Structure formats: structure tokens, C-alpha cells
Amino acid sequence: MIIAGLVLAAIAALLHVYIFALESVLWTKPAALKTFGTSSEEAEATKELAFNQGFYNLFLAIVTVIGIILVGPAAGVGYALVFAGTGSMLAAALVLFVSSPGKRAAAIKQGTIPLLAVAVLAIGLLAG
């Protein structure tokens, strides 16, 4: 179960790197416009906010990946970082779900893998 939890955490990190790319690099490009349902004008007006938000997602991914790497040599620290990264991803998805009813589908997509990572890793650690 622990390995499955760590694999899910790695997938969640990859998803958040993708979100980083959409928000910080591709925000005004057709792929991001389509993904977020924004117009070119809206994207131009919000690109500084999106740029910052994208880095938030990147940093969560980095914390998670560092945690996964540290599970071997420093398990306690590694698990703490994995839970901090994926737990924050999940919390952000919950905030989006509650605060923006029109974006609930996106919140579910953003939060499902981190939720599974947290749950499976916790079960694995408690069972082990």
C-alpha cells in the first residue's frame, strides 16, 4: 500500500507540474484558454495572477517529489513532505470546489489523485 500511495503522490505531482505549465507558461495559448474556459481578453487581464498560481502548484509538486525521494533515507521527513504536498493539493481542490460551483468538475479532477495518495499512503502506514 505504501508503494501505491507514493506512486499516486508522484502522479499528483506530475499533474501539478502540468497545471503549472498551463498557468505560468501557456496561460494565453489556446490549450490553456480551452482548459480553463477563458477568453484571450480574460487571460491577458489575469496572466500575472495565473503566473503566480502556477508556481504555487509547481512548489507543491516539488515538495511532494522531495518527500518521495527522502522516504528511503529519512522516512519520517519524507512521509511528512509527501503528506504536506498532497494534502495541500487536496485542500486547494476543496477550496475551489466550495468557492466556485462552476469549477467543481475541475476541482474534482485536481483533487482526486491527491485524495487517493493521502488515503492510500495513510492506510499503508497504519497497516504497516
Image (cartoon, rainbow, N blue to C red):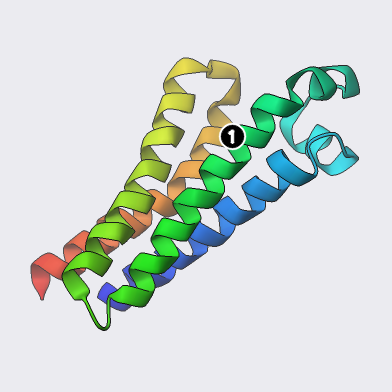
Relative to 52, is 115 above or below?
Answer: below
Name the quarter where the N terminus is drawn: bottom left
Going 37% across and 76% down the picture, which residue do you hit? Answer: 69
In depth, the one of 4 and 23 nearer the eye is 23
Q: Position of residue 77 (x, y in %)?
A: 22, 66
Q: On the picture, is 4 further left or further right than 28? A: left
What amino acid does circle 1 point to? Answer: Gln
Left/right placement of residue 45 relative to residue 5 reads right
Vertical placement of residue 56 versus 1, above or below:
above
Tell me if residue 1 can be seen.
no
Quadrant of res 122: bottom left
- Report whether residue 57 is seen: yes
Q: Residues within 10 Å of mark 1 (few under 14, many from 20)?
A: some
Q: Looking at this view, name the residue that lies furthest to the bottom.
A: 73
Asked if 45 appears above or below 119 in the picture, the reply is above
Could you tell me how many numbered marks the image carries?
A: 1
The quarter of the picture where residue 8 lies is: bottom left
Q: Quadrant of the C terminus?
A: bottom left
- Residue 116 shown left or right of residue 79 in the figure: right
Q: Position of residue 20 (x, y in %)?
A: 64, 47
Residue designated by label 1: 53
Residue at the (86%, 22%) spot, across then down? 39
Depth order, front residue of 60/11: 60
- Residue ID at (71%, 49%): 21
Q: What's the residue at 73%, 31% (across, down)?
A: 36
- Across and down, in percent, residue 89 comes to 42, 44
Using residue 7 as the reference point, say whether residue 100 is left or right of it: right
